[in-house]
Image (cartoon, rainbow, N blue to C red):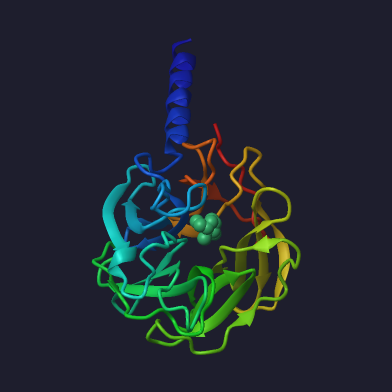
Amino acid sequence: HIIMLGLQVLLVIIATRLNAQNPLIRDQFTADPSARVFGDRVYVYPSHDILATEGRGRVGWFCMEDYHVFSSSNLTDWTDHGMIVHQNSVPWVRPDSYSMWAPDCIYRNGKYYFYFPTMPKDTSRVRGFTIGVAIAEKPEGPFVPQPLPIDGVRGIDPNVFIDKDGQAYLYWSQGHIYGAKLKENMVELASGPVVLGDLPNKGLKEGPYLFERNGIYYMTYPHVENKTERLEYATGNNPLGPFKITGVIMDESPVGCWTNHHSIIQFKEQWYLFYHHNDYSPAFDKARSIRADSLFFNADGTIRKVVPTYR
Ligand code: FUB
């Protein structure tokens, strides 16, 4: 009896601990988590949802003015390193846009490159969203924004991948998913953008995230055909495809957050999916919270569906 009781207490503690993990950040809204392993910590670069008010953004819509970065050594205790980029600190950004949407960050040759989509003041080159870069020497900054956005890019949701041969790629979305090679300097395109045309042609696709495992390139993306986004993936032998639509990573949310946006990392031998949901704002799905769950592969390299731990 004592052993059984002890086991039950242990299970309750474990269950409480696991449940306690999501959402990851509890004192502010966060979305679109781009997770990266730098050294022995996980760094997450999310969007930072705030609530629009008259004169601050568009009421009822996404509203974001800055980015924070968070890090953890155990995926449970998170350090907020504070604000790293604000719309007012980037010379080319329209200060009244409140559109600092889903970012990404990557390490190369001693520097950290932070990519973010937002609206430019000068619409003569690009109307709508474009993508900028800020550079730091440490993952938590300070980040110095480049004076201009990346030439030749129109769209949102940047994602960067560096292949084994050192070639870097930038992906983004604008109705479809686009990809292009980046120059060694990480702030200019080295090739013209191509549409990744083998992905679903019906419904909105956005939030591309590419990773490689055992020689398979996984192009993963949120895709909405009905009401909410489903995380799907396609696989190929090359970072720019061709890709073959392969499966679903996470089903549509049954409880009404129309966006989902993710990243996938391996940390200490375990793979994880980072994503978001409107846990702390059930009535308004543009105030979101980031989450993470373990992700597993089958022997043939396909991904087992992740079932979120909604409460
Ligand atoms: O966070 C604003 C937008 O919502 C992102 O750019 C999309 O991926 C979706 O999550």
Q: Is residue 146 placed above or below 46 in the rendered structure?
A: below
Residue 218 image point, x, y percent: 61, 67
Q: Residue at x 49, y 69 (%)?
A: 158
**In the rendered view, does 253 fall on the left or right side of 110?**
right
Q: Is residue 296 placed above or below 119 in the rendered structure?
A: above
Q: Residue furthest top?
A: 1
**In the rendered view, does 150 fall on the left or right side of 192?**
left
Q: Is residue 71 placed above or below 97 in the rendered structure?
A: above
Residue 221 image point, x, y percent: 61, 62
**Can you see residue 263?**
no
Q: Nearer the viewer, residue 39 or 134?
A: 134
Q: Residue at x 59, y 44 (%)?
A: 257
Q: Residue furthest right?
A: 202
Q: Quadrant of residue 95?
A: bottom left
Residue 278 image point, x, y percent: 52, 41
Q: Quadrant of the C terminus?
A: top right
Residue 310 image point, x, y percent: 56, 36
**Can you see residue 160?**
yes
Q: Residue at x 51, y 51 (%)?
A: 61
In the rendered picture of this protein, how many numbered marks are placed on residues? 0
Q: Quadrant of residue 36?
A: bottom left
Q: Residue at x 41, y 43 (%)?
A: 24
Q: Nearer the viewer, residue 137 or 84?
A: 84
